[in-house]
Amino acid sequence: MAEKLSKADMLRKNRNKDGRPRLSFTQKKDYKVSVKFAADEYYALIEKARKAGTTISALVRAALQECDIKERLGSSHLKIILQLTGMANNLNQIARRANAAGYLSAKKDTETLAKSIDELIKSIENDG
């Protein structure tokens, strides 16, 4: 004769047959990130999710996919910025001298500085 299974045994037996299929490794969401918001930021986030008709999690994921993060300036970029700052100071001094003594006296200095700026721009283009 057939044995009579209890309801609990039947549930254990049919456990995953009719359920949702397992997600692949790339689709599974295993990581959780906690972020603190001020009250106005939090309510703005909720409102944006509501307007988009999605969850906060889905909204944040979509924003992450669409945003463009710029990398932090490295030491080589900082050196270039310092060089440009020095060149800007030199240009101001040349302009002041040109206004006081005449533009022909500042021509050589201006051409030298323009060459330096061109070389710096070329080095930036070659690095990036």
Image (tube, helix red, strand yellow):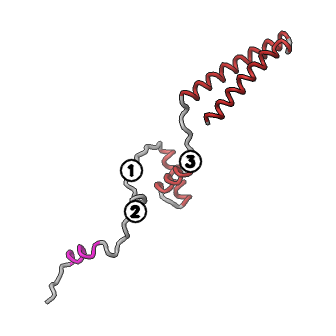
The answer for how far apart the CA atoms under marks 2 and 3 are is 26 Å
Figure quadrant of residue 99 = top right
Q: Which mark is residue 32?
A: 1
Spatial separation of the CA atoms under disc 2 and disc 1 = 18 Å
Location of the N terminus by quadrant is bottom left
Query: Which residue is drawn at the image coordinates 72% and 27% (left, top)?
Result: 118
Asked if the residue under mark 1 is in contact with the one under mark 3, i.e. CB atoms within 8 Å, the reply is no
Badge number at residue 24: 2
Q: Which residues are magenta?
A: 7-15
**CB of mark 2 within 8 Å of CB of mark 1?**
no
Q: Please report the residue visible at 24 percent of the width from the left and 75 percent of the height from the top.
A: 13
Query: Quadrant of the rendered structure where residue 36 is?
Result: top left
Q: Position of residue 22 (x, y in %)?
A: 36, 66
Numbered circle sitting on residue 12: none
Is the residue 11 above or below the residue 107 in the image?
Answer: below
Q: Position of residue 100 (x, y in %)?
A: 83, 10
Identify the mark nearer the N-term, 3 or 1. Answer: 1
Q: Label 1 amino acid?
A: Lys
Which of the two labelled residues, at mark 2 and mark 1, occupies the earlier sequence position?
A: 2
**SS at mark 1 in the image:** loop
The residue tagged 3 is 67
Residue 102, by quadrant, is top right
Q: Residue furthest front?
A: 126
Residue type highlighted by circle 2? Ser
Judged left or right of residue 12, residue 115 is right
In this rendering, is residue 115 above or below 51? above
Q: Is residue 16 left or right of residue 42?
A: left
Give SS at disc 3: loop
Examine the residues drawn in magenta and state their main secondary structure. helix
Mark 3 residue type: Cys
Name the element at disc 2: loop
